[in-house]
Image (cartoon, rainbow, N blue to C red):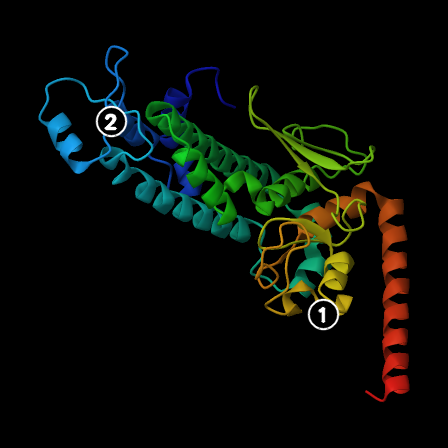
Amino acid sequence: MLRKTKFGKAFTEYSHGDEKKFLGKLSHVEYKTMKQVLKRCRPANGGSCRLGSQETVESEESSSLPQCCKCDACLLCDEKFFSELEKEASEIAERFSTKVRRLLRLHLSTAMQSGMLHLFHCLSNNQPLKVQQVQMLVEYATMNAIAMRKILKKYDKVHSSVNGRKFYLRIRADHMELLQSPWLIELGAICINFSGANEGEPNCYSRQFSCDFSSDQASMRFFVSDSVKLEYALTCAICLETVFNPYALGCGHLFCKMCICSAASLMTFEGPKAAPAISKCPVCREVGVYSNSVHMTELDLLLKNRCKEYWKERRNADMMANQYKVYWDSQTKVVFGI
């Protein structure tokens, strides 16, 4: 858990902590370095100077006074700032995804995973280690995401600009914002599944992670620290029900498998990956997000264990709907001679 202290100090302590044994050489946001860059542009004695041209930059560099900046584009900062942050965001997102995939054993075939997953949870004798690894990955994602947001907010404050905000929106659009990653939902689900309880009582494994399926809007909550709490909706944007046999598209949006397949004019057994390249996400309308869709295996197991009646009803309804679709497709071919 994070202590109540300044974020810069907490982040420095975190990035030099014991997590390195598991996280290895995972990248971190160079928060301290970036703050040093911004310090060179802080207003001096309440004044301001604009670094809008190369001549101004050169004159400021030759001055003995502290540099300051109140402009939309700062040549002094931008040369090192956004390119470095983009590189860090890309590396962090890629390595986080790789680490989670390994933890969740996604290199195994889907069929083998589906058949053995419950047995694996029941017989695993290293649950505390697995849960500790989940917690470290969640903290890794959270700390770096907060560091990214804070340094960009600081940039805009120093420069009286919105370029930091624009950059943040761009990395979100490029799926490099870790707190949007569906892998966090899988991490929360695996931790709750390790608890071994179907009724949802809190215990040493699921205390940091909780799920609520009793209300109209199913959700999952993470308690990373006293001041950092995350919440994720588990509702399909198409049927507006709790997701069943959930899939996450490349953009991060969650859907029931049957719903997202229907949206792409696919049979359920084909799966979202079979969608045409031009297919768009029903929520954000982004193209090309079906090919890297992910079956949320741990979330599916969580729903099966915690919402047994609902899960059975949805399974039977989906099987019936799929049979009707197959039947009407066959009749269409007969009538039109296709």
Label 1 element class: helix
Please name the residue that numbered disc 2 is placed on.
Answer: 50
Is residue 120 visible to the viewer in this orientation of the structure?
A: no
Q: Is residue 107 left or right of residue 30?
A: right
Q: Nearer the viewer, residue 304 or 222?
A: 222
Q: Nearer the viewer, residue 92 or 190?
A: 92
Q: Is residue 204 left or right of residue 312?
A: left
- Label 1 or label 2, whichever comes before in sequence order: 2
Q: Is residue 58 above or below residue 321?
A: above
* Residue 119 point in image, percent of width and height: 72, 52
Q: CA distance from mark 1 to mark 2?
A: 58 Å
Label 1 environment density (alpha carbons within 10 Å; few <14, some 14–19, many ≥20): few
Kind of residue sitting beneath label 2 = Arg
Kind of residue sitting beneath label 1 = Glu
* Residue 19 point in image, percent of width and height: 43, 35
Please name the residue that numbered disc 1 is placed on.
Answer: 270
Is residue 243 visible to the viewer in this orientation of the structure?
A: yes
Label 2 environment density (alpha carbons within 10 Å; few <14, some 14–19, many ≥20): some
Q: Is residue 9 left or right of residue 119?
A: left
Query: For the point 46% across and 46% down, which residue is it?
Result: 93
Q: Nearer the viewer, residue 28 or 45?
A: 45
Tell me the quarter of the picture where residue 261 sits: bottom right
Query: For the point 72% across and 42% down, which residue is it?
Result: 234
Label 2 element class: loop
* Residue 157 point in image, percent of width and height: 38, 23
